[in-house]
Amino acid sequence: MSQVEIETLLKKSMGLNSVSVGSATIGRAVQKRMNARSEPDINAYYHEILHSRPELNKLIEEVIIPETWFFRDTKPFQSLDTLVKEKYIETVASGKKLRILSAPCSTGEEAYSIAMVMINNGLTSNQFHIDAIDISNRNIEYALIGIYGLNSFRGNDLGFRDKYFMDSPEGFILDNSVKQSVDFKQANLLDSTFRLNRDNYDIIFCRNLLIYFDREIQNSTLSCLSGLLKTDGTLFVGHAEGGALIGTWSPSKEFPGSFAFKKPDPHIAAASLKNKPVTAKTGSLAENSNSLTKKIFNKPTGKPFSTTSKPATSSLVTKKDSSLADATRLANEGHLVEAAKICESHLRDNGPDTEAYFLLALVREATGNRNQAVDYLKKVLYLHPNHYEGMVHLSSLLELLGDADGAKIINERAAKIQNKAG
Ligand SMILES: C[S@@+](CC[C@H](N)C(=O)[O-])C[C@H]1O[C@@H](n2cnc3c(N)ncnc32)[C@H](O)[C@@H]1O
């Protein structure tokens, strides 16, 4: 018995692929829980989480990555705004309620951003309904409080903060008009009961979750989302996740760069899903993790401090080299300049290195320097032509920079790699 069994259990219960966060991260979380339980024996701890859902939930709380902020990535929210103006204003005028799902919602910033778009368009609470779910009870409780620190506000366009928040010593307090328009619940997207008793949605935001799943669980999650989305509905995924949908879902032509997709044609979907959908309850998961390149740090953008106590963000350090591990940690903490300096000095001392270039690319991307990020990602792919994450980042950056053809080519390469890995 070892950590491997615990990783398998985590994968089965919440979908987490240990390759995506690194075994070291999971190891630290397990150790933390073992210390809290005064349990020195990993076998005994494994048996405890096998039989105690509350303790398993506590371990899940330790391994999740709650990183999020208001209007993250901007473009999806601009596209949502256009969708509401061009399509849904008419729908709600005819008496139908617009239904939106934010899953996972983490600490609520995404769902509340959606609500602000609705309210800005003059929609009233009886014209739209927003469900927001997350596996973490702690995140849901935080969302329900509705008080946010500086780390939840990134970028320069913060007019929404003046409009919908009140500054206070505890943090920025969200206005009740927005707070009351989201229905938060704890739920596991992998749970076989997740779809039960839910009406379909017009719009689903499922961003920055699929990156933590392997191909098989990505497929089962996408199949669940497809079942929950209306025929003409729109799914928004994260900018590193488009590759998982290629070949089945259709990228929305109206909203390039938003990672917006239309439902898959059921015939194509059936042909491309090699693996049967699995659920947290029914299991049958492949134990072999796929060979996707390890992610080395979790969305580094943003300011390093918060005026309220937000759940801690786990860092995704998997690098054997300690200087790059330091750079990764610094990036996770928001110290991007320092992280970049370490990478540059690592490259000077050791010569070309895929992970240093990749981390530098993510840092440049996070600080808005897309062209430099593209240059570093090209170096990554030169050294490591099958670097999947490098490809998805490069493809999304090219799209944002207006090179749709280049983005398409790289995206197709990424999809091929992932198909092979799956
Ligand atoms: C990085 S956040 C993404 C939040 C938001 N969608 C965004 O893009 O900013 C990932 C969230 O996924 C949640 N999560 C992980 N596995 C989950 C599952 N199986 N079901 C529901 N939520 C899950 C975590 O608790 C975490 O809050």
Image (spheres, helix red, strand yellow):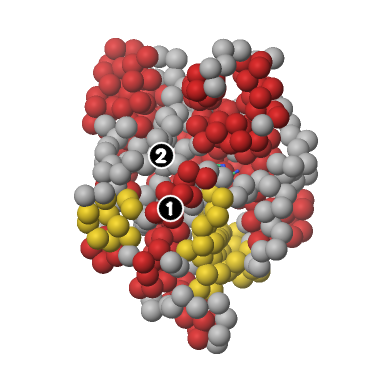
Q: Quadrant of residue 287?
A: top right
Query: Which residue: 43% across, 52% down?
Result: 143
Query: Which residue: 69% across, 22% down?
Result: 47
Name, please, the residue furthest toward the front: 38
For ligand 1, tell me if the residue under mark 1 lies within 8 Å.
Answer: no
**Where is mark 2, residue-wise?**
311
For this view, does 295 lie left or right of residue 186? left
For this view, does 159 lie left or right of residue 54? left
**Where is mark 1, residue-wise?**
143
Q: CA distance from mark 1 to mark 2?
A: 11 Å
Identify the amino acid type marked 2: Pro
Query: Against 281, is 23 above or below?
Result: above
- Alpha-carbon neighbours of circle 2 within 10 Å: few (<14), some, or many (≥20)? some
Query: Which residue: 26% across, 18% down?
Result: 345
Please tell me which of labels 1 and 2 falls first in the chain: 1
> Quick one: SS at disc 2?
loop
Where residue 286 sits in the image (x, y, percent)? 73, 31
Where residue 120 sits in the image (x, y, percent)? 35, 73
